[in-house]
Amino acid sequence: MRIAVLGGGPAGLYLAALVKQLDPGHEITVWERNAPDDTFGFGVVFSDETLGGIEHADPVVHEAMRAEFARWDDIDVHYRGTVTTSGGHGFAAMSRKRLLGILQERCAELGVDLRFRTPAPDPAALSAGYDLVVAADGVNSAVRERFAAAFRPEIETRRCTYIWLGTDLVFDAFKFHVLDTPHGIMQIHGYPYGRDGSTFILEMHSDVWRRAFGPIAATSLAPGESDEKSIELIRELCADVLDGHQVLANNSKWTAFGTVRCERWVHGNVVLLGDAAHTAHFSIGSGTKLAMEDALALAACLHEQSTVDDALAAYETERRPVVTSTQRAAQASLEWFENLGQYTHQEPPQFAFNLLTRSRRVTYDNLRLRDPEFTAELDTWFAGRLGTDVAPPMFQPYRIGELELANRVVVSPMDMYSAEDGVPGDFHLVHLGGKALGGAGLVMTEMVCVSPEGRITPGCAGLYTAEQERAWARVVGFVHGNSPAKIGVQLGHSGRKGSTKLMWDGIDEPLPEGNWEVCGPSPIPYTARNQTPRELSAEELGEIREQFVNAAASAARAGFDLLELHCAHGYLLSSFLSPLTNHRTDEYGGSLENRLRFPLEVFDAVRAVWPAERPMTVRISATDWCEGGIDTGDAVEIARAFAAHGAAGIDVSTGQVVSEEKPKFGRSYQTPYADRIRNEIGVRYPIAVITVGAISSYDDVNSLILAGRADLCALGRTHLYNPQWTLHAAAEQGCRVPWPKPFAAGSWKPQSGRTDGPPPRLELVRSGVPGTAHARWRPEESR
């Protein structure tokens, strides 16, 4: 096979060496426009997983690399004059220049044709004369640009500016320094790559960069030239960090990170490799790692498959999920550093934990395995702030307004579509009562509708008749009489999304008969098949406001502990907030201030009748997931407005406002919105911030709470799967919490048939996999 490789970086060279090693009969040519000893940057980082793959594929390369490695286990976070250290992380790094030298030597030894200082021929011509053309020509890939119509690349430029430097100071750990400068917050990422130097990256939000470096930064530099004026200022700003050591430059220029994503990586017999196909932010140390893993996978596929087409298809199928996952983690990390300024109110232990878990790949449980002393210190610090006993963060108590919750777990509101004429029945008693018995601190009802016309479906529960009030009082009475849980009611009106089938009969589909008229701020249907809503007049808005007031008074009499106003998911109050659904030209439309007017009027009216000692929260959609709709900045202002009007909490959800939305689903995918609201609004107002969305493990709950990204975590489907999830989470973490008395016997297992006497001691058994620990019981005598 004749293979043309365009680009002599780690991806191209390693692929050439692997393929030639697997079959010496392959004819492989590598074109590289730079000289063999030209390289930009300083050090590259590898994970143990990647190194294991390299060792298995080519022990010669691995052994040569191993001899050059700088290894360390610690991460040091320098913040507010303190250093917080976490161990057990296991990094390896080496000089990029030396890595290229090793790969060049291996290629030459195997007979690869290396052509340095030679621009590559036109890729279209190469694809006609070679069996395979590999584009390993980096982030600015000419091949990707040449066939852009086929690869369909997207390059997202972010809001931080950074410069890649080196220093002769050899760091003894991976270093994160947070610099509070007169221009704003800056951050240093630093790590050793050998016996004589370290990589040193200075990064900051672009607004900070403009203030600090905008007036002096070089606007045009020749290839290989560095921005010396900026570097001189960097020496001054980082003097305390560098302690007299040098700042080294190597084609060092300011740039903004661009995340490269391609819809396809293969076009005919041309394939993208490494940065040409994808990039991931340097803060998770993934660039060279991903490139060399790509090379490993492509070489294996070429060796295992009978045709080039089959090999390229197998390569993309294998690698794309891995790259997507890495890019998702890198994006979370990148965005964390973009928003670093919103965390500088945090105390050093919490800030360090927040930084370490920013990508969501490192978690509370993961850190407890890597560095148990570090996590124990965090637990002690967190408990000390609250004046409570040490326990996992999710089992620390919390207070919303004057309402005391036993823990940080909330059973999220979930529509059950099982009421008759709006009356909750035995199903709701079992459903909500069972969740309360399961240990959650707060159990929320589904959206309880304030009028018959405000229902989503005929099966939705209401609170507009005396019979409904009595039925809800029965549910509340059971929860209060049989568990320590608190119970909240969520009040809402379906608006334009009403008069539809039960979810399992066809979600959002109109009823075949018996429809009622729907309404909204503007006559815009949810979908083409749904009714066009009646635009509400000012008089009708007053009537609906009174329906909310009456329902709230009824909820208070029923004994609910908390009331949540549903201003999310495209229902009536939500549809006033979004410019995509509110096209009014009166005082209730136009600016965000005007669009907030009616929801705030409802909130104020409800707050006036809701008992003062009981808190009110508001659920919002923090983004419409659609261009032109509500997004993060608007969500912050919406939260601020409700907080100023007395909301004790903001329940942060997203989407479901317009049918054409394009949500970006993933683990904890809605948490960044709660995170920003909590750390921008929550530090100024006494409000609780509740996060929801694809949270399913106690590890995630602990991580989110301890990092300060939310105060409470609401889980829905998880509680449908396991109503006793919270009690089980406590058992798995070795945390003693009270079980309902009738269930208490199930909290321990008898030993040798013995059923009398006190319950034995609970002991946690770890499997080594976060979230999968199990509990076992030891006899009382072993205490």
Image: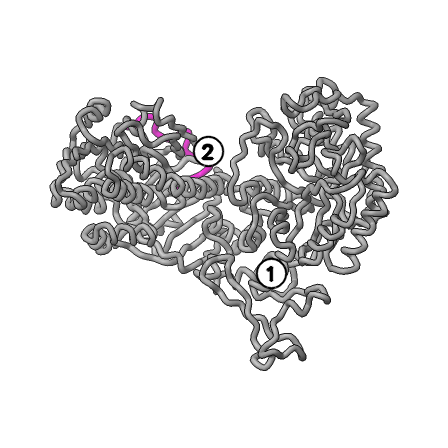
Residues at circles 2 and 1 in contact by the CB criterion of under 8 Å: no
The single residue placed furthest to the right in the displayed view is 466
> Mark number for residue 502?
none
Q: Quadrant of the N terminus?
A: top left
Which residue is found at the position 67% from the left and 42% from the top?
Answer: 650
Q: Position of residue 16 (x, y in %)?
A: 20, 40
User: Can I make out residue 225 in this image?
Assistant: no
The residue tagged 1 is 728
- Of 242 and 746, nearer the camera is 746
Q: Position of residue 222 (x, y in %)?
A: 26, 28
Q: Position of residue 175 (x, y in %)?
A: 39, 51
The single residue placed furthest to the top in the displayed view is 585
Residue 542 on the magenta segment: no
Which residue is found at the position 75% from the left and 29% from the top?
Answer: 598
Q: Position of residue 614 (x, y in %)?
A: 79, 48
Which residue is found at the position 43% from the left and 30% from the top?
Answer: 156
Residue 211 on the magenta segment: yes
Q: Quadrant of the C terminus?
A: bottom right
Secondary structure, mark 2, is strand
User: Can I make out residue 581 in this image?
Assistant: yes
Extent of the magenta region = 202-221
- Of 511 and 162, nearer the camera is 511
The residue tagged 2 is 159
Left or right of 598? Residue 673 is: left
Secondary structure, mark 1, is helix
Q: Amino acid at mark 1?
A: His
Q: Amino acid at mark 2?
A: Arg
Q: Is tag 2's residue or tag 1's residue first in the polypeptide sequence? A: 2
Left or right of 190? Residue 133 is: left
Left or right of 769? Residue 68 is: left
Instruction: Count neighbours of disc 2 (C-alpha within 10 A) and say few if under 14, some if 14 to 19, many if 20 or more.
Output: some
Q: CA distance from mark 2 to mark 1?
A: 42 Å
